[in-house]
Image (cartoon, rainbow, N blue to C red):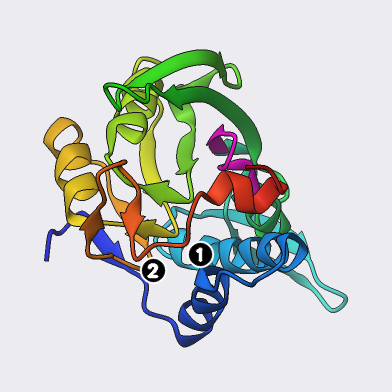
C-alpha cells in the first residue's frame, strides 16, 4: 500500500461508518455518527504528533510532562461537508484553530471552484488537518491543499470518511507527500463522480438538504 495512505481499520470506526452508509439513517443520527467517528479519527491522526515537555505541578510534586501544542494545530474544513467532522475533532483538540476553504464542484467538468478561503495567521509553525468526508474525484481536495501550501504550514494531513482509487491517485499525483487517513477505500466512482457504494452526498445527509 502507498506509504502515504493510512487505512484506519478500528472496529468502532468501521461499525459507525456502516451505520452512516445505511440509507435509512436519520439526519440527526448521521450527524452524531460523524461527530463520533471524527473524534476517533483525531486519536489516530495525532498518534505521531510532536510533543513538548512542560513543567507542571501534580497534587504531590512537580514533574516534566509531555503535551501536544494544540494551539499549533489547524483544522481546515472544506465547506460545507467538512464541518460535519469539525465538532468531533474539536472535542479531542479543543485548542486547535479552525480554517475554512469554500469549494464547489463544477457539475460539467467536476473541477473545483474556490469561493472562500480563511485561515489563521502565522501558519508557518502550524500542523494542518484537512477535513472532508469524501475524497471522490480528488479535485477539491487537491485544490484545497494547493491553496494551503501557499501558507507554508509545517505539515498537512488529509482525513476523510471514504475514498476510492481514482481519488487517491488524483490527490497523490499532485501532492504525493501529503498523507491520507481514511477508514474505507470503496470500489470507485459512478458516472456523476460519486463514490460507490459510498454513503450518498455527505453534505446533504449532514444538513438535511437535497
Q: Helix, strand, or loop for circle 2?
A: loop
Q: Helix, strand, or loop for circle 1?
A: helix
Classify residue 34 by image quadrant.
Answer: bottom right
Residue 55 percent across, percent down from the top left = 68, 57
Where 121 sits versus 132, above or below?
above
Residue 66 percent across, percent down from the top left = 58, 62
Which of labels 2 and 1 is toward the front? 2
Determine the residue positioned at 39% across, 62% down. 198
Label 2 belongs to which residue?
Answer: 183
Label 1, residues with CA under 10 Å away: few <14, some 14-19, many ≥20: many
Residue 120 shown left or right of residue 14 in the figure: right
Residue 28 percent across, percent down from the top left = 77, 63
Where 196 sits versus 193, above or below?
below
Q: Are marks 2 and 1 in contact (CB under 8 Å)?
A: yes
Q: Quadrant of the C terminus?
A: top right
Residue 167 percent across, percent down from the top left = 24, 46
Q: Earlier in the sequence, mark 2 or mark 1?
A: 1
Q: Is residue 9 visible?
A: yes
- Magenta range is 74-84
Label 1 belongs to which residue?
Answer: 41
Amino acid at each position: 500500500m502507498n506509504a502515504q495512505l493510512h487505512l484506519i481499520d478500528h472496529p468502532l470506526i468501521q461499525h459507525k461508518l456502516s451505520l452512516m452508509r445505511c440509507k435509512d439513517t436519520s439526519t440527526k443520527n448521521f450527524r452524531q455518527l460523524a461527530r463520533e467517528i471524527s473524534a476517533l479519527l483525531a486519536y489516530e491522526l495525532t498518534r505521531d504528533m510532536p510533543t513538548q515537555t512542560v513543567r507542571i505541578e501534580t497534587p504531590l510534586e512537580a514533574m516534566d510532562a509531555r503535551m501536544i501544542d494544540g494551539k499549533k494545530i489547524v483544522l481546515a474544513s472544506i465547506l460545507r461537508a467538512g464541518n460535519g467532522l469539525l465538532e468531533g475533532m474539536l472535542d479531542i483538540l479543543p485548542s486547535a484553530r479552525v480554517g475554512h476553504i469554500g469549494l464547489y464542484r463544477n457539475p460539467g467538468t467536476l473541477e473545483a471552484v474556490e469561493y472562500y478561503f480563511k485561515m489563521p495567521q502565522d501558519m508557518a509553525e502550524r500542523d494542518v488537518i484537512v477535513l472532508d468526508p469524501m475524497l471522490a474525484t480528488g479535485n477539491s481536495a487537491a485544490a484545497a491543499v494547493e491553496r494551503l501550501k501557499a501558507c507554508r504550514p509545517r505539515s498537512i494531513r488529509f482525513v476523510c470518511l471514504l475514498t476510492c482509487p481514482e481519488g487517491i491517485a488524483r490527490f497523490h499525483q499532485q501532492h504525493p507527500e501529503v498523507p491520507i487517513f481514511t477508514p474505507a477505500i470503496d470500489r470507485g466512482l459512478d458516472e456523476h463522480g460519486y463514490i460507490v457504494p459510498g454513503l450518498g452526498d455527505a453534505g446533504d445527509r449532514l444538513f438535511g438538504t437535497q
